[in-house]
Image (spheres, rainbow, N blue to C red):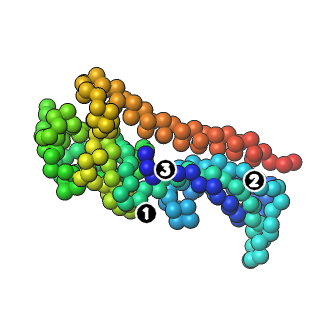
Amino acid sequence: MEGLKVSDANLMVCVHPSMSRRVSQAVLHQLSSLLFKFNESFDGVVLAYDVGFVDEAAKILPGILPYFGVKLKAKMLLFSPKPNMLIEGKVVKLTQEFLHVIVLGFASAIITREDIREEFAYKTKNGNGVYRSENQKHHTLKVGTMIRFMVKSMDEEILHIYGTLLKDNTGSISWLDNESTGGPITDRSKKRSSENHGMTEQQAIKDIRHADDQLKKAKKRRTVEQP
């Protein structure tokens, strides 16, 4: 999926003197405050980080309070969707007016009817809404479908994405991948491909959670107070 990247960063974290015996804890606390927020310096949403201290010496910074700076090197996993990028998410709500999609388990995306190509007709089946292609009867969009869509814009403050399904390379991931390989589209292959792509998003979320767990463990190891 486009929009994900790893960035190397050289950081200087300012630590209050009261935390002089718990520098690692203070640093990790500040870095954790960056998670799942858009950061202008990194031009993206920070999903996870792996940090290493450059050295144990700290530089006292001038000011009213003698804060000291700690130099760090960090790898930042960023989500930075830009217009015309292709990203993926799961449909969680579907009406005649819009699709509501969740990306990577945390970002919300809306695709309005005017941004869904005309071949998709809205129908109801057993009381549930579905968009079905009039050109390809196996190409359907419903709640639970993993879709690939194009970014129109993003509201960085509330992490809200506006997307479009106007291009031919957007839609149900399972259908698009079967179409690209030229394989027959059967119920079994659609189910298997859908499961695989569900696992792709789940794996991304699992990796983020694993990184967060590792950071918590590192925090416990590093924050033992000196006697």
Marks 3,2: beta carbons within 8 A: no
Give the Cα distance between marks 1 and 2. Answer: 30 Å
Q: Residue at x 75, y 47 (%)?
A: 223
Is 170 or 127 nearer to us in this picture? 170
Which amino acid type is shown beneath numbered disc 2? Answer: Phe
Q: Which residue is mark 1?
A: 157
Q: Position of residue 183 (x, y in %)?
A: 29, 28
Q: Residues within 10 Å of mark 3 (few under 14, many from 20)?
A: some
Q: Earlier in the sequence, mark 1 or mark 2?
A: 2
Which amino acid type is shown beneath numbered disc 1? Answer: Glu
Is 48 or 147 nearer to us in this picture? 147
Marks 1,2: beta carbons within 8 A: no
Q: Which label was assigned to residue 4? A: 3
- As helix, strand or loop, the secondary structure at mark 3 comes to strand
Give the Cα distance between marks 3 and 2. Answer: 25 Å
Q: Residues within 10 Å of mark 1 (few under 14, many from 20)?
A: few
Q: Which label was assigned to residue 53? A: 2
Q: Residue at x 34, y 26 (%)?
A: 192
Q: Position of residue 215 (x, y in %)?
A: 64, 44
Which amino acid type is shown beneath numbered disc 3? Answer: Leu
Q: Residues within 10 Å of mark 2 (few under 14, many from 20)?
A: some
Q: Is residue 200 visible?
A: yes
Side of 162 where 42 appears, left or right: right
Q: Earlier in the sequence, mark 3 or mark 2?
A: 3
Q: Is residue 145 visible?
A: no
